[in-house]
Image: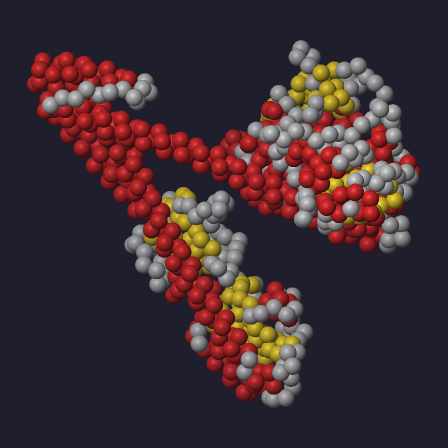
Amino acid sequence: MATLGLVTLLPTTALLVVSHDRAAAALQETAAARTRSGAETTAARLDGYLTHRLGEVAGFAAIPTLRAFLGGEAGSPAALDLLNNLRARDGDGAIACGLLDRFGRCVLDSYSAAIDKNEDHHDYFRLVAAGGGPWSGHAEWVDTPMPVLVFASAVRSDSGEFLGMLRLVLESGRLERVLGRTPIDADSTIVLLDDRGRVVADVRSPEHNFGNARIDVPEADGTAAVAPIKWFPPGGSRVASGYAMTVPVGSLRWQVMVWHTAESYEAPARALVASTLTHAGVVVVLLLLGGLIASRLVARPILRLERSARAIAEGSLEVVIPSGSGEIGTLARTMELMKDRLLEAMAGLEDTAVSAKAASQVKSQFLANMSHELRTPMTAIIGYTEVVCEDEDLSPSTRDTARTILRNARHLLDLVNEILDLAKVEAGTMEVDLAEFSPSDMLEEIVELLQIKARDKGIELELDAQKLPARVRTDPYRMRQILLNLVGNAIKFTETGKVTIRARMRKLPNELVCEVIDTGVGIDPQRMSDLFRPFAQVDASMSRRHGGTGLGLAISKQIANLLGGDITCTSELGTGSTFRLSVPAEIVTAKAPERAKAKSELSNLDGRILLVEDGKDNQRLFGHILRKGGAEVAIAENGLAGIEQFCVDGRPDLGLADPRPFDLVLMDMQMPILDGYSATRRLREMGLGVPIIALTAHAMGDARNECIDAGCDECATKPIGGRALLELCSAWLAKAREPGWSARMPAQRS
């Protein structure tokens, strides 16, 4: 009888669980929608208020009295009356209203301390003076610890000449009255944050002096979502747990946050749990009593239902549930309903999986596009800066400036690469390129690259690499990437002492082990678990001092795992840290490395090169580098123009010219009219047999394979350095002249 009661109970309990989960999700969505509505309504009100105030300032700026004063045609009393009138419209919330001349100096102001101050360095003056329209935003201002709101509009003569600017300054805290118009619960509040997360105003605590209080708002993923955030409850003096949603204010880079205490936000869900448990208890009692009373009468139908329930539990949702009358019929119908709910849930899961796959594809496409958009200008920035640095007539100060630009541009490129590498690892698309290399040469190169950075901090950088094999086989690029990050971090967080790189080859199994040992600040043992998490900083104060994205160690560890190895860390707070990288590496027979080409050899390219590139900056840059290297260069601005360069009289319908007018093609892959992929395929189909090298700003997924499949012989990722470009062209010009060489044909498209 007890078995009968349990068999009867199982399907009903499952139905209660499914119903509870759906109701809980609906309650949570309702709470999130209510929070989102409040935040968006408040942000819209703020934006409307700011737009209205900006319109008033623009209207006052057009009054002839102010124009006459700035033009030297009228005295200050009438103009000052207008300034005071505009300032008085916001009561005590207005700090100052003044006129700036065309050079940014305050010549008249309702706040006398601001007169004669130079404000030409502020964005509101520079943008308006440069011809922009009325401007509103926030800025640091005289005698104010927190940012203020600034509204500015140009004052122009009848002919449109810029005479100066009308500027109104309001206290940011004045916005509390706008925030207070949105109805909220007693246990909730609305907070205004500036672009650095500092609290500007709290509608529930207008008298509270937050000073430099900050709220760390989670990074947005493109959709507004409720997140756990700690803040002061209404009337409270200590922070408490809660939930909040933030939305941006349209005219500013500020955010409105609607915050609820955890108790008020979770109350509906808790009430639902209590109700569900109560109903479940009642159902359990009733089912057990009914089962005990009618067990003999319903034993056979119950057994059939038991078999059906077991089949459903094992995933066989096609099972037919036997029908019945009375309680048995009710239970059978309940199980049928449960089965239907499970079928609906599985269909929902399938839809979710499809949506997740689509979202992943969108993310990958977004990262690919961002890679292209970032790398394209970085090509010009790094390339032209390298050209400037090579100028022997530069003064030392100018050369230092150019090197600073180059160093920071490369650092920005490293950040882009880190984000793309993380995306590749998460998507499982990062590939390992095993090759033979000298571990000693790689380590010496790393020391040489970072020696200046260590010397600038007054610390030593030592290399202890003994009894290493002459050559090993693993991925040299990824090994170098990991070690540059580990050694760079060690130097960054070491103020005195030294950083040591210790390398050994361990056998059985063969592993290349590199230890980076520093005498820096060390790591708190309680924060060690966060060390290799993406975007995590083990010490927020140190990260503010030294910078960093928090991606380097996370990417390094995942790359080490991809290579079959690992990174571990031991540290003592105040003494230093040791990071240990171990990667499987095959020892290979040493062979003489190829001699690097001297600069003089690279400066004597013998050949005619066609550069197919739509970017004007890159046309000039690559053309300059190639011509300086000795090549004859022609430029085509898109794929169709590139094809015409090879054709008789520039007409593709007449076929390829003979002999070929060029020995090598550099093909940008993203171009208008006809892209590089299509242009390469058409040239190969027409019988072109010279090398084609793809130049692409894409660094995601199968970008290289797509270029090769289109018929390119090689693929180079932008930005590419001048020396690397010359080496690549020199190698392929030489290879094309070797007997028996033939161009790569495009892959057949399915």
Q: Is residue 80 left or right of residue 488?
A: left
Q: In which quarter of the image is residue 737?
A: top right
Q: Quadrant of residue 524?
A: top right
Identify which residue, 294 or 487, lies in the foreground: 294
Q: Is residue 372 visible?
A: yes
Residue 502, how many percent across, how many down? Answer: 72, 24
- Identity of the residue furthest to the front in this view: 654
Residue drawn at the location 11% of the way across and 16% of the way down: 298
At which x and y percent is residue 185? 30, 54
| Residue 534 against residue 579 in the figure, above or below | below
How far across and how far down the image is residue 655, in percent? 79, 40
Q: Residue at x 18, y 33 (%)?
A: 278
Q: How many labels does the image show?
A: 0
Q: Which residue is drawn at 87% across and 27% down?
A: 738
Q: Is residue 283 left or right of residue 33?
A: left
| Relative to 696, 304 lies left or right | left
Q: State the quadrant of the N terminus.
A: top left
Which quadrant holds residue 294?
Answer: top left
Q: In this view, does 236 lie above or below 111?
A: above
Across and down, in percent, residue 247 comes to: 44, 53
